[in-house]
Amino acid sequence: MTNLRPHSYSNLYRLSNHTYPILETIMGVKKERSVSSKRSQINKGAWTSEEDTKLAEVIAVHGAKSWNTIASKAGLKRCGKSCRLRWMNYLRPNIKRGNISEQEEDLILRLHKLLGNRWSLIAGRLPGRTDNEIKNYWNSHLSKKIKQKEKQGCIDEKRSVENGKEELRQENTCAAGGEDSNISFDVDEFFDFSDEKFEWMNR
DNA sequence: AAAAGCTGCAACCGCGTACGT
DNA sequence: TACGTACGCGGTTGCAGCTTT
């Protein structure tokens, strides 16, 4: 991806995994988009660097729990839910930023095959990655890849089928959404990380 | 040059569950 | 046990920037 979007800082993350909050402050690229709700006086939209700082400070003192308390202690016009999300997906230490590696992608595919859309569980197996990040990555990259593969797979299978009945059966399988409702799955194969490409997992 | 469409990501929303009273 | 509140999760939306027409 070559986008350079100030509001998401994806490219800043790629410059450094650890310095993005500092960078955005120094560079002043963060766009202040939070809008104050007329009804509830609760801020919505993008977080400002000031809000991030306040939230991080309060969590450093009180810990990452009782989110409504944290929100009020930080003096943020945010709900606890929003604070939690911000912390979990952005401010939390040890968050790995940048591109998903091939190994990670492969692991996501395997885990998704096993667990389905259980993003938090999948994220739990990928140190430093958040469920939101994986979900987004799946929706924007992997789901398309899989659809393409399935499409290709259906075409290939069709070609190989001689019997008309069998052909019809195959079409029905593809037409049923293609999602893994009837996929046979070998758990042993899934957890077999002996392959050299998973050496990093064993480490 | 500009309008329309597309993409990727952060954030919001609604629901189910856990927990405390 | 019943109820209220907080939390966590997955689906969805909104928006900035890019690409295409």
Image (cartoon, coloured by chain):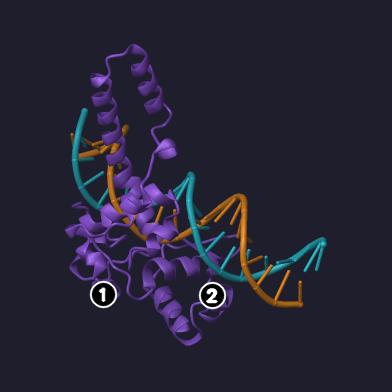
Chain colours: A purple, B orange, C cyan
Check the residue under mark 1 and report the chain it is in: A
Q: Amino acid at mark 1?
A: His
What residue sits 44% from the left and 38% below the top? A181
Find numbered disc 2 in the image and state the secondary structure of the residue it sits on.
helix
Q: Position of residue A42 (x, y in %)?
A: 55, 65
Q: Position of residue A131 (x, y in %)?
A: 40, 59
Q: Amino acid at mark 2?
A: Ala
User: Relative to A106, is A84 above or below?
Assistant: below
* Outermost residue, top side: A164
Mark 1: few/some/many CA within 10 Å (<14, 14-19, 20+): some
Q: Quadrant of residue A185?
A: top left
Identify the residue position indicated by label 1 in the image: A18
User: Relative to A139, is A170 above or below?
Assistant: above
Q: Position of residue B7 (x, y in %)?
A: 28, 44
Q: Quadrant of residue A98?
A: bottom left
Check the residue under mark 2 and report the chain it is in: A
What residue sits 39% from the left and 20% below the top? A169
Q: How many marks?
A: 2
Along the viewing direction, whichever of A28 and A178 lies nearer the viewer: A178
What residue sits 30% from the left and 39% below the top? A146
Identify the residue position indicated by label 2 in the image: A71
Discs 2 and 1 lie in a common subunit: yes
Mark 2 vs mark 1, foreground winner is: 1
